[in-house]
Every structure is written in C-alpha cells, then in structure tokens.
Amino acid sequence: MTARKSGKTHPVALFTHAACLDHDPGPGHPETPERLAAVLEALDESAFPSLRRIEAPRATRAQLARVHVRRLIDSILDHGPLHYWRMLDADTLMSPGSAEAAQRAAGAVCAAIDAAMSGESPRAFCAVRPPGHHATPDTAMGFCLFNNVAVGAAHALAAHELERVAIVDFDVHHGNGTQDIFWSEPRVMYASSHQWPLYPGTGDRAETGVGNIVNATLPAGAGSKPFRDAWENTMLPALDAFAPQLVLISAGFDAHKLDPLANLNLETGDYAWITHRLVEIAQRHAEGRVVSSLEGGYSLDALRESVAAHVAALGE
C-alpha cells in the first residue's frame, strides 16, 4: 500500500470543476446543471471556509479502462462535436459539454483518492455530475456515463495497492453498475440501501457476489427508523468486519422525503448520521480516509440541506 504523508493536512477537500455544469441532458430532465449549482451554493466559502477547494482533473483513458470497455469509453469521448442532444437511452443523454463533464467527474474521484492516500486531505467530497453508479462496464444508463466511484475504487486498487476498498451507497436507487463491476472482486465491498422495488430492478438481498455485496431493501414510504436500523444492524457490522482501508461513498440524496423521483422519507439529519458512522469506521480501519461523490438528489432544497449536513459530518 502506497500512502505518503505530506507536510500539511487539510481535513476535508472539495473536488469539482466548472465543466460539470456544462452537461445538459435537455429540457425537463431532472438531472439538471442547477443541481450542481445548488450544491456549490450550499458549500460556498461563507458556509465552509475551511474546505480545501480543488479543480478536478480529467480521468485518463487508462483509469476509465479499468472498469469500462473501450467501446463505451470511445463512444463517450470520441463522438466528435455535438450540436444537439445525443440519446444513449430513454433517460441518458449527451450534450456538447457532456464528455468533458464525465471525464472530470471520474477524475475528481481518482484525484481525491490520491489526496486521501497521501495524507494531504483524508476526506473529500466530489461535487460533480453526471452521476455514475448505474453505468456498467459496457453501458451508460440511468443518467450516468462513466461510473465515477467504480473508476476511483479500481484506481485505489491499482495505483495504491489497497487490498480492501468499501463502496457505500445510500442513493434511493440501487447502484447496479457498481455491483456489476465488482461482482467477482473480493477486494471491493459494495454496501447499498435503496428503495425496493424501484429502478433499475436490481439490489435484492439475495444478490451477494462473492460475499462482497450487501444489499438492504427499503419499502416505499420507509423513513428514518428503517433506514437507520438497516445500517445499524446489517450494513455497518458488515463494513466493520471487512475492515476497509478506504471508504468510498456514492452519495445520493434522493431518499429524502422532499425528493420527487422516489418514495422514501429520510430527513436531512439521517445523512449526517450515516456520514458520522462511516467516518467512525474509516477512523478504525482506514486512517480516517473517506471519499464521497455526488450521485442523485432532485429536490434542490433537500439537496442543499443534505449535502451541507453530509460535508459538515465529514469534517467532524
């Protein structure tokens, strides 16, 4: 494992890039640039003066190719200039700025992992879009082009020689792409709580990979208690037993009661609670290293509040 200690430590870093605002899926689409604008507003310097703010680099093709087939990478990055929307599926579209945004989103997670492993910034939030956890090795889907957190996990294994990386996903939708990518990879644990049944139709409790996947299903209408019970009784003990050297978070905030795309009823405080618990696990096993990346969340008011609570908890 390659973990270098730098001279100065910044507890929490914010990785983002203006290009992520240029991904435009089109009129009426819920995954709007305004989502990221709301996040950045919630995390402005007046509210979070101690955040170290870093411009996200582009992910390299080699980094992307650790989890995606060349055909998908080329189709996203080598399509030529776009002057219109390009539909990849019924929900997933590209605009002229989408390729750059997707490359910066995946690159943010890799760079944040490098900063965590060096000791420079043990914890980070990647305020990026498009989201990633539905993207499979060969398919862009569910608003996602590249699987940002999966690219980061593979980078941690390859570049930093980690043996145990945990991906935690509390988005209201199951991260089918992340599960698919690491289904047979015992060095990566994937733990997800999500509404069931719901898009994309995966995430049953019986889906366990090689013992490295733990799914907690929540019925429509479930609120704080079932969510916290699932994590307290099942998911957190499994994470503790796995003893990750790095904790990655697919941070979707669409399980909030105000979100229009699903039917869970989490409160803003639930995101602070789960973040605190994940930081505790990271402190026990991973020298405090946590890298979180934005996934869903489609109520702008709930998104502002939830992201602020999440990032505040990362810094405590």
Image: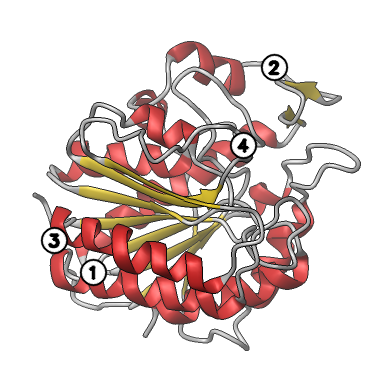
Can you see residue 43?
Answer: no
Residue 219: x and y, percent? 58, 53
Residue beneath the point at 52% across and 75% down: 270
Task: Give the residue pinned by disc 1.
Answer: 281
Which element type, helix, strand or loop, lies under badge 1? Answer: helix
Name which of mark 4 and mark 3 comes first in the sequence.
Answer: 3
Quick check: marks 4 and 3 in contact, CB under 8 Å?
no
The quadrant holding residue 41 is: bottom right
- Element type at marker 2? loop
Q: Nearer the viewer, mark 4 or mark 1?
A: 1
Q: Where residue 80 is drawn, which disc sits there?
A: 2
Residue type at numbered disc 3? Arg
| Residue displayed at 29% across by 36% down | 154
Comes first in the chain, label 4 or label 2? 2
Q: Are marks 2 and 3 in contact (CB under 8 Å)?
A: no
Q: Nearer the viewer, mark 2 or mark 1?
A: 1
Of callouts 3 and 1, the N-terminal one: 3
